[in-house]
Image (cartoon, grey):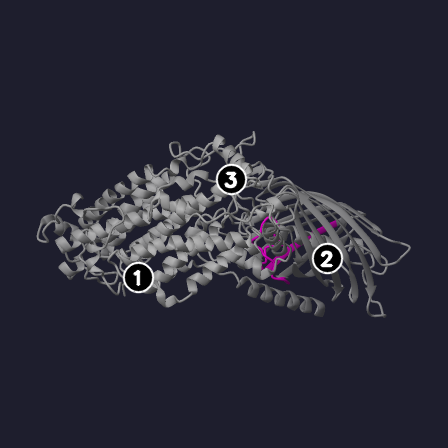
């Protein structure tokens, strides 16, 4: 009996220890769910004078004059708000809380999510060839798109720039019509988000949604349903929160769509659709490199996969012309038979064979490989975490993301130009003893994409947020070094990549210095 | 994409978790078997296992992958069991693991994995002329002993979670024939990974990952005598949550990893060198989801000895426990 008691006590105490273990299990909270409601410190009412990216004249767009506040239509709009506000559910309050962090921010997050979701390389055919996603048949396997880093950079740029131009245009009409928010017109309407003196017709949220939805239909055609559902939810948020009437939303959404159509037309003809190249061109890359006496890049995948988007270099940049792409191309890498090249390879081998846990962590943090939002997405996430602290207006959010992402897209173009001009082998191709600490990308080595993307982003962010000091350039250094420590790149790859990326970033800074927006705040 | 190492090793640990012996009977004792060790005895020794797979299930789609080839995981462990009473034993084990892929560029992994501690209690025993029926309850806790990279599948050494497993075991034997069945539930803690966002079925902005809990059912039957045990084993391990690896995507620690395996073990105790026991076995995954179709071969050597001279051997017939 005594034994039974003792054993029972033992088991009970184990159970207590066990339950303390299980308390380690907590619901995982996304940090983006903790973002506060957007409360701009500056409304940027002069944003209608800021320089758009593609739009030349806001008056070419159709935005009907708003109904008079005394009209039956407007009164009906107000009644819709009041109807919602009488009995909001918890779910509806959660929608308000989510979207109140900001329209540009949330649509950027939706983009990042779709990029991560579609960033999977196609599975091979039985004969060892690979199928390619098709924009004309997007639902066939492999689903369109494969949102690899160049595709993602371009997608972020188009959506961000379209949102920015749409907002600049919207400010023209906001200032023209100068309609006060519903809660100012009718004081029985509650403002469930921070009040704003910004004219509310057309709705700035709707302009962003209209632009984002229109662009994303093109960029992520299999997600139209999801994208439209998000826009519906956002529309409901604006009305429930008393921030916009339905007619303010509709006018904004229509304007956003119209502006985005200009960007969509550009996207359809920017040559990205042909970036995949042809088997003839893939072979030509090898022969022209061999003709120079250089060892050419070979896919390290099994079965061998065609190189990623070799003709992305031909895509029309946002910040400069195609001749500038060539002029930004860095000089050649160390010749593959040179002593310098061998020394660089030796250093990569060293890091492969001396992988510390710290290096593994750095490599994993910056890897941004398959199934992630890619390096451009990572820099969007970094920027968003910082922008949230700045309490920007929507239009400044859009402008700063547009600057960042145009720099990322153009960095992709210049980097891809470099990669395919030199068609330089990866360290592991030269020495199969060089094992990598993350997946090896399927394109040439020189120069490092991570370094180009990171330096371009850091240059833009350092200009926009000078009080952060060297924070972003330090991060870019870490991102670049992670590729050396991960045995993905040589030191020359990352050093040259950082230099070129920073040069591309400077073009965005030059634009920022002259677009009329200033530094804000 | 791989065999949930955790579960696999856990099982291995169980298999390795030797021990038992009364003065006359040697046999490996496991968390999921019906074998005990008497009070004030210690049973300890090294264990080895090697496990490899070429095919794996990506969700429910079975494939191989030229970018990893054959994945081989070797485990070198040391186990010890102590009899607190004749009905309560404690077992601890520590494995060192190496993990390599035969193709592709991924760097191999090696290091000390998790400490596991198991307490096993014989709660009930009924002897009749129709055989002996015993009921056991056990609790296992495991905790990582090194900062290995869990988010490096398929080569990660483990899931790097802190786990607690509760198991109920029923054991019946008649003469030298036995049957043992058990069911377990494993609670797994969240883990911290090196990146601060990841995609599952949505994008999560955190370095915390919620791992699905697991259930396990284990059945074994065979011959059990003083010097020899020969048994067949079937095991069904299921993730209670998690998500599938999408076509050609990378694996992730919170995938839904299920597997069913069959195997056999043999344990032999020397008559000439008292207290020494050998064990060997094989375990093959016949069905799975988001795991590798592995085959594991294992072997071990254990030695049992009393630590108090005045012996209180109440249950010498250990195999029959």
Highlighted range, magenta: B144-172
Could you give the CA–CA distance between mark 2 and mark 3, rounded to whole angstroms?
35 Å
Residue at the spot of label 1: A37
Please name whichever residue, B204 or A382, is drawn nearer the observer in this view of the structure: A382
Question: Circle 3 marks a residue in which chain?
Answer: B
Q: Secondary structure at mark 3?
A: loop
Residue A153 is a magenta residue: no
Residue at the spot of label 3: B247
Residue at the spot of label 2: B77
Could you give the CA–CA distance between mark 2 and mark 1, rounded to whole angstroms?
54 Å
Residue B158 is a magenta residue: yes
**Residue A44 point in image, percent of width and height:** 22, 60
Q: Earlier in the sequence, mark 2 or mark 3?
A: 2
Is residue B285 in sight in this rendering?
Answer: yes
Q: Secondary structure at mark 1?
A: loop
Q: What residue do we see at 29% from left, 47% from top?
A: A162
Q: Quadrant of the C terminus of chain A?
A: bottom left
Asked if badge 2 and badge 3 are on a common chain, one would say yes
Secondary structure that dominates the magenta span? loop
**Residue B134 point in image, percent of width and height:** 72, 55
- Which is in the foreground here, disc 2 or disc 3? 3
Please name whichever residue, A159 or A234, is drawn nearer the observer in this view of the structure: A159
Question: Circle 2 marks a residue in which chain?
Answer: B
């Amino acid at each position: 009996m005594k034994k039974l008691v003792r054993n029972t006590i033992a088991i009970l105490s184990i159970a207590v220890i066990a339950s303390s273990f299980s308390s380690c299990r907590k619901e995982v909270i996304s940090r983006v769910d903790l973002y506060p409601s957007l409360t701009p410190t500056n409304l940027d009412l002069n944003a209608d004078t800021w320089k758009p990216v593609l739009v030349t004249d806001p008056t070419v767009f159709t935005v009907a004059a708003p109904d008079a506040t005394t009209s039956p239509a407007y009164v009906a709009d107000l009644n819709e708000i009041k109807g919602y506000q009488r009995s909001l559910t918890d779910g509806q309050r959660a929608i308000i809380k989510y979207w109140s962090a900001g329209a540009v921010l949330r649509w950027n997050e939706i983009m990042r999510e779709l990029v991560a979701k579609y960033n999977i390389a196609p599975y091979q055919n039985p004969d060892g060839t690979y199928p390619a996603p098709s924009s004309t048949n997007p639902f066939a396997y492999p689903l369109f798109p494969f949102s690899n880093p160049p595709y993602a950079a371009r997608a972020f740029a188009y959506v961000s720039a379209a949102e920015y131009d749409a907002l600049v245009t919207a400010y023209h009409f906001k200032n023209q019509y100068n309609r006060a928010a519903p809660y100012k017109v009718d004081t029985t309407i509650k403002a469930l988000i921070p009040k704003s003196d910004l004219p509310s017709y057309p709705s700035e949220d709707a302009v962003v949604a209209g632009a984002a939805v229109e662009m994303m239909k093109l960029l992520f055609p299999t997600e139209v349903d999801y994208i439209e559902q998000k826009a519906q939810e956002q529309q409901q948020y604006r009305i429930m929160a008393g921030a916009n009437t339905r007619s303010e939303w509709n006018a904004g959404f229509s304007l956003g769509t119209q502006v985005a159509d200009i960007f969509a037309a550009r996207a359809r003809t920017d040559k990205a659709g042909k970036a995949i190249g042809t088997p003839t061109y893939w072979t030509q890359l090898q022969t022209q490199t061999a003709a120079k006496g250089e060892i050419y890049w070979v896919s390290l995948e099994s079965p061998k996969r065609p190189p990623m988007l070799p003709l992305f270099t031909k895509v029309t940049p946002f910040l400069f012309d195609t001749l500038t792409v060539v002029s930004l191309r860095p000089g050649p890498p160390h010749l593959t038979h040179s002593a310098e090249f061998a020394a660089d390879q030796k250093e990569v081998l060293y890091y492969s064979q001396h992988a510390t846990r710290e290096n593994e962590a750095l490599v994993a943090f910056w890897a941004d490989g398959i199934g992630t939002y890619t390096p451009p997405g990572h820099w969007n996430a970094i920027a968003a975490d910082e922008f949230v602290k700045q309490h920007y207006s929507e239009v400044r959010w859009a402008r700063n993301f547009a600057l960042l992402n145009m720099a990322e897209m153009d960095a992709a173009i210049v980097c891809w130009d470099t990669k395919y001009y030199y068609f330089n082998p990866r360290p592991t191709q030269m020495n199969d003893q060089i094992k990598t600490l993350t997946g090896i990308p399927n394109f040439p080595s020189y120069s490092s994409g991570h370094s180009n993307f990171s330096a371009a982003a850091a240059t833009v962010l350092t200009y926009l947020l000078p009080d952060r000091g060297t924070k972003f350039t330090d991060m870019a250094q870490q991102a670049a070094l992670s590729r050396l420590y991960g045995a993905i790149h040589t030191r020359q790859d990352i050093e040259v990549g950082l230099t070129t990326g920073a040069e591309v970033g400077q073009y965005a800074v030059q634009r920022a210095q002259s677009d009329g927006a200033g530094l804000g705040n | 994409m791989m065999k949930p190492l955790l579960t696999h090793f856990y099982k291995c640990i169980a298999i390795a978790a030797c021990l038992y012996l009364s003065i006359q009977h040697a046999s490996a004792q496991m968390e999921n078997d019906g074998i005990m060790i008497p009070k004030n005895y210690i049973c300890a020794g090294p264990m080895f296992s090697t496990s490899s797979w070429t095919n794996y299930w990506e969700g429910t789609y079975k494939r191989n992958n030229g970018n990893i080839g054959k994945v081989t995981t070797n485990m070198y462990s040391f186990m010890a069991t102590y009899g607190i009473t004749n009905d309560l034993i404690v077992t601890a084990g520590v494995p060192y693991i190496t993990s390599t892929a035969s193709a592709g560029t991924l760097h191999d992994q090696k290091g000390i994995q998790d400490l596991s501690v198991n307490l096993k209690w014989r709660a009930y025993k009924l002897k009749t002329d129709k055989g002996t029926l015993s009921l056991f309850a056990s609790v296992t806790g495991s905790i990582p002993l090194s900062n290995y990279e869990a988010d490096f599948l398929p080569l990660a050494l483990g899931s790097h979670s802190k786990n607690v497993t509760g198991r109920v075991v029923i054991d019946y034997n008649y003469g030298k024939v036995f049957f043992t069945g058990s069911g377990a539930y494993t609670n797994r803690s969240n883990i911290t990974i090196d990146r601060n966002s990841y995609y599952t079925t949505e994008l999560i902005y955190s370095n915390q990952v919620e791992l699905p809990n697991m259930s396990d059912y284990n059945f074994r039957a065979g011959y059990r005598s003083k010097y020899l045990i020969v048994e067949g084993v079937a095991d069904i391990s299921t993730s209670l949550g998690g998500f599938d690896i999408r076509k050609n995507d990378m694996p992730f620690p919170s995938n839904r990893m299920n597997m069913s395996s069959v195997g056999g073990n043999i344990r032999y105790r020397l008559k000439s060198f008292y207290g020494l026991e050998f064990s060997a076995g094989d375990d093959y995954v016949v069905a799975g989801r988001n795991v590798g179709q592995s085959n594991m071969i294992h072997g071990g050597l254990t030695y049992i000895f009393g630590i108090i001279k005045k012996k209180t051997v109440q249950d010498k017939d250990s195999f029959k426990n």
